[in-house]
Amino acid sequence: MILVIASVDWRTSPYLALGFLYVLPIVLSAGFLPRWATVLLGLGCAVLAEAFGLADRSFVRLVLEAVALSGCGLFVAELCRNRQLTLKVQERFRALVETSPAAIITVNDRGVVELANRAADALMLPSEGHLSGQPIAAFVPELQHAFRREEESQFRASMHCQVHRGNGENCAAEVWFSTYHEGGVPKLAAIIADVSEQRSVAVQSDSTPPEGIERLALNGREVAILRLVFEGLPNREIASRLEMTGSAAKHTLERLFSKTGAHSRSQLVRVALERYRDLL
């Protein structure tokens, strides 16, 4: 391409200058050449442009053309290298997710599973064989309440709950999830671990949300503690964060258990998601 441009520029040199076209081969080759070769290519093209240009020879113009052409090539080269690094990181992350023994999923704002690794398919056993494209409410209903389209805040939390498998069975699971935004659209990523063997009795009884209890009003301190419990902080950090004594934090937490009907922190997190979502 450089030879063609130089040949045409030489033939039309008394009437037309085509030196600006040298940027095309530099941009096209910048993603494959090392940096020093890109600089040399820009310098060579600048020499050709100056040799067949309409104006008189000028060293200053030669230097400026060489800097401009080399700069364009180096800029495109950095874009290509950054893109290649991003693709490598994505490939490594995808391999890490696929080989993880824990079930990993992402859910879009419509509550539909976008991505799911093999462990997630094996854990939830959807009837179609693949979890992607399935509504998360059919397998982990609690995650359906984890985010709302109109909210911009992001948060992370964990909870114990029941996972409904595609074959009709249930299993106790521990879920770590985090909300995020992609292109302005809220989404959710979750790691789900089967803990039915360790908590076969305790989790099944604890994961059942209290029924028939209406939402009671919470005061400012109770709301603040509920938010911190939702973030997974222990009593000591809650007391330190709110500048109160440990006994006062414990007493307020007991009032929260009484008002919500929850019997554990994980159950309180679920109640908070279902009844007090607007306060979080």
Image (spheres, helix red, strand yellow):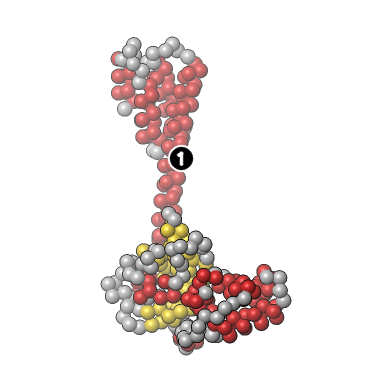
Could you tell me if residue 159 is visible in this image? no
Give the x, y percent position of residue 152. Answer: 49, 60
Q: Position of residue 221 (x, y in %)?
A: 64, 74
Task: From the image, tell me which residue sits under label 1.
Answer: 78
Instruction: Name the secondary structure under disc 1.
Output: helix
At x 44% / y 41%, what residue is drawn? Answer: 79
Front one among 148 and 68: 148
- Crowding at mark 1 (Cα within 10 Å: few <14, some 14-19, many 20+): some
The answer to which image quadrant residue 46 occupies is top left
* Picture residue at 50% right of the left edge, 76% below the top: 275
Percent from the top left, x then y, of residue 233?
61, 72
Q: Residue at x 31, y 27 (%)?
A: 1
Q: How many marks?
A: 1
Whether residue 58 can be seen here = yes
Could you say where residue 237 lies in the image, as x and y percent from the top left? 66, 72
Who's the residue at 32% across and 78% down the image?
166
Give 164 or 253, whichever is nearer the viewer: 253
Identified by mark 1, the residue type is Glu
Instruction: Point out the image quarter for the C terminus.
Output: bottom right
Q: Nearer the viewer, residue 239 or 13?
A: 239
Q: Is residue 66 above or below residue 270?
A: above
Q: Is residue 90 above or below residue 221?
A: above
Residue 238 is left or right of residue 3, and the answer is right
Left-right relation of 164 to 177: left
